[in-house]
Image: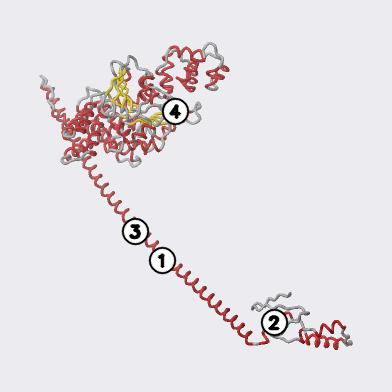
Amino acid sequence: MSAEALLERAKGLLLRTMTFYRDDPRTSTWLRDRLERLDQPLRIAVSGRVKSGKSTLINALIGTDLAPTDAEERTQVTTFYQYGPEPKIMVHTPHGAVQNIPVSTLDSTTIRDLQHWRPDEVSRLVIESPTPGLQAITLIETPGVASAAVQETGRSALAQILSESDAVLYLTRYPRQTDLQFLQSVNELQTARSVPINTVVAFSRADETGDGGSDALAAAQRIAERYRTDPTLSAFAQHFIPVVGLLGQASSTMTEDDFKVLAYLARLSDNDRDTLLLSAERFIKAGLEAVPSEIRQRLLERFGHFGIARSLELVRGGADTAQQLQQELLEISGLTTLQETVHSQFVERQDALRARSALLAVDMVLRANPRPGVQQLLGEFERVLSNAHEWNELRVLSALDSGQVRFSRPLQAEAKRLLGASGHSAQARLGLDGSAMGADLADEATTTLSRWREQAVNPLLDRAHRDAVRTVLRSAERVILHQIQNQGQPQPHTAHRGQQAQAQQAQAQQQAEAERARQAAEAEQARRAAEAEQARQAAEAERARQAAEAERARQAEQARQAAEAEQARQAEQSRRAAEAERARQAAEAEQARQAAEWANQSRSADDPSRTPATQFLQQHDRPTGRRALREGASNATSTGGRRRAPEPDERAGRSRSSVNQPTGSHAKPDPDAPSHHVDPTPSGRHSRN
């Protein structure tokens, strides 16, 4: 089934879906718009982050300054740039009304003012221009991802706009998580995930990569190569292209006056030219009378510092004409590579992309509005989606062109040829001329099929290359089946019997070879079916093994956690028991100490000699009264001296001594004697006044 046949089947399915939902005016109208759009030029949505250079790149692609460019975020309304015989601006409101704004010429100022309208006031802005660059494609400029307009209307609205387009050109300075999430939201439907062939990622402003020096483009190329092999991004896009949008726009719109100014600046001395290029301010304010500062400022705004420096290098290197300089600048900016990729990836495959858009519309309706009786449409949708081998061919071709999949040079060229890069006829796919006979085609097809069967069992290939080999192998099988189907066509008769016999013999040989090829194809299909069944059983066994291992691991983990919890519980119980035992022993010791103190106090209260005053005197051991006299007499006797007669004062004092006074609690204190205050507390502490 060719791309044209695939588009016809997708149209038929879309028409039957529209008939099925004819009682729903909103759904049927939406499907009718999608059906009418299949006959219009290919729609390419240009989207990306805020200030990623969308307007600049649109101007570079169409070759004229049509989209307004500003230093601030301007695009609030989705803008369509399409071809028209005369300039025209149409404003579509959210309620479905269309307002035609009469204009004689299109200028960026008018479009800029219209783009400032709020999304709830204007749903889309359609700009028609007789620009040749818009004859084959329609460019859709969307508000920037994470912009104010997208935050107001929601990311789903922008994703729906992109899903309505046939292809997406996504711009970013450096891929971030926001870019990845947005690309995932655009490709969330089954059809989009099955056919990732409509997205090209452009690294805009590649001249600002790193420090923005002379090696900025080389650094951007390395980044693009790294992301080209990233499986996360390659699931949505196959092409990653660094682009200097400002230089591409200036190159595509360069005039003879611009070339004359650049040629004059290139003829300056090395010192003056280097001084002029030190900074943007010096370039504008330098005292150069031959080129006024206003012209230099306009040149800097259009080409940028990077573009002017490279232009002067090219002019000094031999770019003598404006056309030659323009071509070299377009090549340096990456715009030529981007235009070639857009043409080969989108324009040349527009039938397959339109068929994808038709099936995507059917998928969206069947998911959003299911109803009884829709199973027949779902079955037909699944059959078309599974039998669309052309989409697989386009996906592998994109991977081969972008470098995501690489074979040896002979196999690389043969794979592209078998996938239809050089044409869809059997002769073009097999690399033979148009006059090749059926026998030659059968021999070449059989040899090619054997060669790619060997690659299918190559253990050194990774998954991406094995998938590519299977797609190429199926394309070769389709060539053989096509030859078998054409064997029934009658051969031209000739007048000579010998030639008839030769023709019949050749036809018999072709039929035999075709039969062998058919049997080989059937055997290959049976082998592939057996391999698929074995792979399915192995996958199921692996899933069962993993589930069993996961269950065992879960049980072991539960047992370990239970054991740890039990150990922790026992340790906590032991700790609490030990603390309780220590508390009990401490309480018993405290009770024993208190009992001993109370016992001592009781004994002191019963024994008169153990009064607090007596305890105090015993502690301080100071002799008083008769004891002092006795100890004095014993000391005098022991020293052999005579007792000294007491003085009168001493006799008077001794007579007043406390030993001659009554003791006890009823004793009257001597007013002339020093008073003694006894602390009755058990601590035995005293204070003397």
Of the residues tagged 3 and 4, which is closer to the observer? 4
Distance from disc 1 to disc 3, alpha carbons, whole Å, reads 21 Å
Please report whichever mark, 2 or 1, sits nearer to the chain's N-terminal start: 1
Distance from disc 1 to disc 4, alpha carbons, whole Å, reads 63 Å
Q: How many numbered discs?
A: 4
Q: Residues within 10 Å of mark 2 (few under 14, many from 20)?
A: some
Left or right position of 26 against 105: left
Q: Which residue is mark 2?
A: 613
Residue 385: which quarter of the image?
A: top left
Please report whichever mark, 1 or 3, sits nearer to the chain's N-terminal start: 3
Q: Which mark is residue 29?
A: none
Q: Which residue is mark 4?
A: 206
Residue 302: which quarter of the image?
A: top left
Q: Which residue is mark 1?
A: 566
Colour scheme of the picture: secondary structure
Distance from disc 2 to disc 1, alpha carbons, whole Å, reads 64 Å
Of residues 346 and 182, the one drawn nearer to the viewer in this rendering: 182
The amino acid beneath tag 1 is Glu
Distance from disc 4 to disc 2, alpha carbons, whole Å, reads 106 Å
Q: Which residue is mark 3?
A: 552
> What secondary structure is found at the residue carrying circle 1?
helix
Q: Residues within 10 Å of mark 1 (few under 14, many from 20)?
A: few
Distance from disc 3 to disc 4, alpha carbons, whole Å, reads 53 Å
Of the residues tagged 1 and 4, which is closer to the observer? 1
Left or right position of 492 against 400: left
Above or below residue 556? Residue 497 is: above
